Amino acid sequence: MEDNKINNNGIMYVDLDLPSGTLWSTKNVGANKPNNAGFYFQWGEVTGYNQWSIRFDNTCDGLTWSNYKWYLCGHGYDDTVKFKKYTKPGDTLELEDDAAHKIMGGDWHIPSPEQIQELIDNTTSTWTKLDDVIGMTFTSKKDSSKSIFIPAAGCALNRTIYNRESAGYIWSSALKNGKHSYDGNILKFWPGHATLDSYDRVYGLPIRGVIDGKCDNSEENKTDMEVNKDLNLIEVLKCVSREAKLWSPYCGECSFDGMRYDNELCIRCVHGNEVLNFFSDGRLSKDGECMLFPSKDNRDWSTFKVPTKIHKQFKPFQKVLVKDWHDCRSRWVASTYSHYDTALNKHYLTVLLTVNDEDIIPYEGNEDKLDEITDESEY
């Protein structure tokens, strides 16, 4: 691990040539060397415990919900659990509750989800050993002499260490922006994989400190935030059809699901069964960075073009069949075509009625469908 430097408080870091300029510490909080696990912290706690104290020392009461600093009441892992602080999905730690900042001092802090994703995207991850300790080495894609090693220290719950030497975890500074408020975003890695994931905040995980860097002002090194300065996705996406494919470093490919105007989180997208609500400038959290883009390879919204909707083509006054709903069911009826409205994405008939693309077909070649029942309502 070359290019180690000393920052404030005499702590070593590595500049991995990341786009944001973020600097990563060479060892976990509480560790005396890079291959040590260091302390295990519950999310938002500034008191950590080493492996020995978790398993044997009476000074540690066990990492459980009842011993968690911010636990208020309810059952863990379901919607009844409540917290004294950081109660909403996407909440970000204040510096007074940031263990890296409190213990390391200076400019050090726990990495944000965006900084973890940046590390994954801009380094090569290799499952390896450092002095017989298993872990993951993250090597700069720009300079192979620059790397950091993070041990596969597993996670702690109650008085047990799980997945040691088979997986590694590092807390981020923000809760997952999803349905629940008990999941914190994490760096998770195991043989052949490194990803931004989430974990229950009651677990004890290691922490690795970072320092925010200053970005190069050149075009090549502009950050996504700089590229998308003054971004207003309400205007950009107002004509985009639902289910259009977008991309987020948080989850990968997601589908646009429309706008919301009842609160600040107004851009709604869907990834699998998870609903993601973004601010108008693409952030998932108020203190985060833009996390919604046209595609994985295009992070510049100024180049985004609304996908042209391909619709069925008809000629004015052409005879067509359209679905006519009556008594909770529809049937094909004959009509005469007028034109297509691109703003509404609807077909107009000469009788001034409109129909959707899936509800109209040519009459010619489909004569046998006339008066045929097509759909029945569930209601």
Image: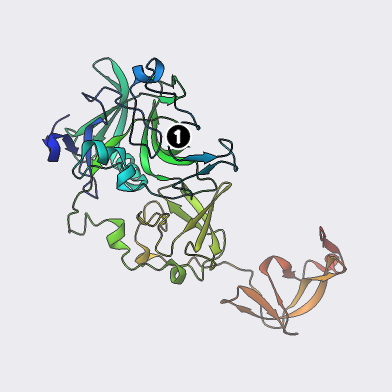
Residue at left offset 16%, top offset 32%: 145
Q: Left or right: where does residue 179 sit relative to residue 115?
A: right
Type of the residue with mark 1: Tyr
Q: Which residue corresponds to mark 1?
A: 68
- Residue situated furthest front in the rendering: 59
Q: Which of the 4 image quarters holds residue 311?
A: bottom right
Q: Left or right: where does residue 115 sit relative to residue 84?
A: left
Q: Which of the 4 image quarters holds residue 81?
A: top right
Q: Which of the 4 image quarters holds residue 341?
A: bottom right
> Which image quarter holds the N terminus?
top left
Residue at left offset 53%, top offset 68%: 261
Query: Can the viewer see residue 139?
Result: yes
**Frontmost residue, 176 versus 314:** 176
Q: Position of residue 181 (x, y in %)?
A: 50, 45
Q: Position of residue 74 (x, y in %)?
A: 58, 39
Q: Left or right: where does residue 338 sit relative to residue 379?
A: left
Residue at left offset 68%, top offset 80%: 348
Identify whether 67 is placed above or below 352: above
